[in-house]
Image: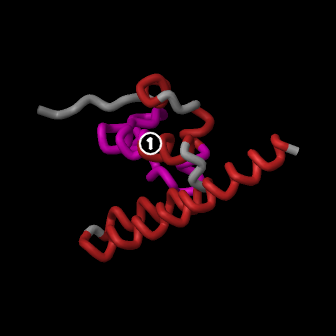
Amino acid sequence: MTQSPLLIGELSRETGCNIETIRYYERIDVLPPAARGGRYRCYYAPDASRLRFICRARTRAFSLEEVRTLLDRAKEGGVRSCGKVRTLAVGHLQAVQQRIASLQNLSAT
């Protein structure tokens, strides 16, 4: 059974990601270029999964470079890759915690 492609509007609705943001992610190579069906961009389940991951990471304040690194590490696979991802995530968490502490200090002032 062949899966039917999603057009960009359908992908946007399914993932909650703005159409212009999807195009931007393609331009900067965070999301691979969509297949083309005539003049339309055609997306499939792996594209939607990747976009959902990107959106979740962005809502958790990961930069696009960090997201790119996470995606690259996921492609590598293996135990070493998991360690690298964990190191990146722990570093990110520490930065977020420092930012929270800084904002709390600002609020208290």
Q: In this view, does 105 lie to the left or right of 88?
A: right
The front one of 3 and 85 is 85
**Could you tell me how many numbered marks the image carries?**
1
Quadrant (top left, top right, bottom left, bottom right) of the N terminus: top left
How packed is label 1: few (under 14 Cα within 10 Å), some, or many (20 or more)? many
Please tell me whether mark 1 sits on a helix, a strand or a loop: helix
Could you say which quadrant of the image residue 72 lies in? bottom left
Residue range corresponding to the magenta coloring? 24-52
Disc 1 marks which residue? 51
Task: Identify the residue at horizontal 31%, vertical 70% (top origin).
Answer: 76
Task: Identify the residue at horizontal 47%, vertical 50% (top origin).
Answer: 31
Q: Position of residue 108 (x, y in %)?
A: 82, 42
The front one of 15 and 26 is 15
Give the residue type that dot 1 points to.
Leu
Could you say which quadrant of the image residue 7 lies in? top left
Q: In this view, does 29 lie above or below 86?
A: above
Task: Identify the residue at horizontal 32%, vertical 68% (top origin).
Answer: 82
The residue at the far front in this view is 108
Q: Position of residue 100 (x, y in %)?
A: 68, 49
Q: Is residue 108 left or right of residue 4?
A: right
Q: In this view, does 36 lie above or below 98?
A: above
